[in-house]
Image (spheres, rainbow, N blue to C red):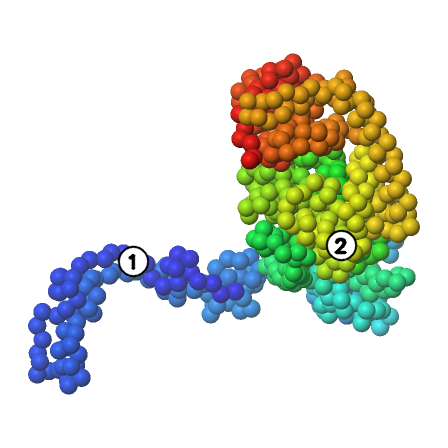
Amino acid sequence: MKQKCKYCDGKGHEIISVERCSECKGTGKSKSVDLMALSEKNLDSFLSEGSSCQRCNGKGEIVSTNKCEYCEGKGTFFYCDKCKTPIFKENVEENLCQNCKSKQSVHFLDDSCTLEEVEVGKLYHGKVNSLPPFGAFIDLNSRIRGLVHTSNIDHPLEENSNVVVLVKEIKQNGNMDLIPKKIETYNKIEVEKTLPLVKSSELEQFIGKHVRVEGEIIQIKQTAGPTIFTVSDEDGLISGAAFVRAGERAYEDILSDMVVSATGEVTERGDELQLEIMSMKKLTGDMRDAVWDRIESAIDKRSAPSETEFLVDSDILEKLRPSMKEVAKVIKKSIIKSRPIILRHHADADGMTAALAIEQAILPLINEIGGSDAEHFFYKRSPSKAPFYEMLDVVRDISFALEDYSRHGQKMPLVVLVDNGSTDEDVPAMKQAKIYDIDMVVVDHHHPDKEVDNYLKAHVNPAHSGGDFGITTGMLCTEIARMINPYVAEDIKHLPAISAVGDRSEAPEARKYIDLVSDKYSLDNLKDIALALDFSAFWLKFSSGKGIVDDIANLGNKKRHNQIVSLYCEQANDMIKSQLDACIPNVKSRELPNGAILNVLDVENFAHKFTFPPPGKTSGEVHDILVKRYGNVPIITIGYGPDFAVIRSKKLKMNIPQLVKELHEEVAGAGVSGGGHLVVGSIKFVEGKRTEVLELLAKKIGETEVES
């Protein structure tokens, strides 16, 4: 292999010194010239440019050099193909240095090799299989075995020991006569069977034939019989079965994320194709890089988001399009590479519709690429009770991911956070996820903090483009889902309208999404669906509610949809009425200095606990009644417990995340945290500081500017 000499940078010499030319004093011009001796051409050159100094050739300096002692002035090295030491091509044969040339070559047969690759008179690496009375059986690989006769054994051999043998004879029946050789040092030559390199998309054309495949290991599953390796190449997935003994792990050195080359026979297993693996090895260096680059380039093209028009006109959405496409691409790329996806969402109507939109888009793709049951291995949807990615969530996600890695050799997952993930409260969990190489993307409309971007592959938030929480996560995720899989557009286009009424959005986009589906869903229908989703989320706790939630959102059985929504709304409204009957008489109200009406409710002592609606929704329902009572007056409602407060407001220019930061700094020892939207949110604190925190909170609200 030829390379530029690193010592002289390919120049063939090294510079000793550089001095100014004493003849021309560094000008590069001659002091005198005989005009009569110049030719016509040189005379013209002299008249236009002057004459060059002959001593320095017009350079103005004298450079002293020595021939490079490493490459002997040639500027290039040839490197030995075996030991990689520098050599001179003209001094050697076959690109080998003298040391390697003098060594004998020992051939190592890959498991794909048959007798066709074995040659009489060559040396081979083998392993002693057994020692019968008449000699020793030697395995050259898992498929080729020869015999060393006792008459040729001149030193002791032990079972399972390595040995170098000379192939003396190959008989017509395939039997081989071998002679053991004592060789301390040798050149190792790896021998593979020449087989066609086939992509996953081409396997069907090679059923019953032996082929070679290259790709990345994305899953390893040990069965009661063979070990199943799932290999991803540029076109898709290849399932390979390797067998040692029943239930025993084959190729223990091969792990997930490795790039490998595997050979075997293509067979049919039911409706699917499988590679019966004969040999498999990890690729390294240039070979690995070439395969990896080929796969990544192809996957990068396949994961490009679809160029869709938004369902409604929106300047904010148009500004968010680049970041939305980036989220879509990261998700789609993970699907193509069979990387597990955990979809985390806030457990309310907005978070659930956002997650359902993404789910409807990705499940068909996951099953298309990984098989009919792939969603059970490569996808999980989990609700988050808090409106942020809390420690309980991340610990559960990491634990499940590590179990899947241990049992199935799966990669660590991509976590998709929707309707949470944008605030400082998410950072502790994100830091923990980063330790375990878990990547994350966020689609959220809570007021964002910059620090979270240090832990994300992509981030969509309307605040990044001049919008606010009125652009709901359900709207954003529905549009992203259409970029991932445009074929689900008709099935999910009603989800943004549900999220809009569920989150009480007053943005112009909310009205447009509601109008978009008004031919099928009235405003009351949408409100009922949103309430039913909130009701189901309360009872589902940490379960995804797959099936029930689909029916509620009208993504499943149409008949059951109407029945379950009607039932849940009846039960939810009864519970809300019961809760309000207990709460409203216990609301305390007073006017603040800015003219706003402050309403406070102790939900710990004057509301039903451990039932629907929970404190957050209870505070919201109380707030809605009080808004109707007071009319167009600025109003704020605080539902508080021992160590928390839920805030709802109208016609006040609130900034709850900023309030939380100020309270944290000004009330020492209270441990204030929280956040949310600008005008809707929650805070937490230590119980002993409740009075001090709430008093300061009320004071700051009284100083807040109200809307005219």
Q: Secondary structure at mark 1?
A: strand
Reading the image, the residue beneath label 2 is 517
Disc on res. 676: none
Q: In the rendered view, tell whether residue 76 sits above or below residue 469.
A: below
Residue reaching furthest to the bottom: 40
For label 2, the crowd category at 10 Å Cα-Cα, with few meaning under 14, some 14 to 19 and many 20 or more, is some
Tell me what residue is drawn at x 84 percent, y 26 percent: 578
Q: Could you say which is closer to the camera, residue 243 or residue 208?
A: 208
* Residue drawn at 85 percent across, 62 percent down: 272
Relative to 184, does residue 203 appear above or below in the rendering? Answer: below
User: Can residue 370 be seen here?
Assistant: no
Given residues 126 and 597, the one toward you in this image is 597
Q: Is residue 205 above or below residue 454?
A: below
Q: Nearer the viewer, mark 2 or mark 1?
A: 2
| Three-letter amino acid code at the position of disc 2 | Val
Position of 647 with respect to 225 (left or right) is: left
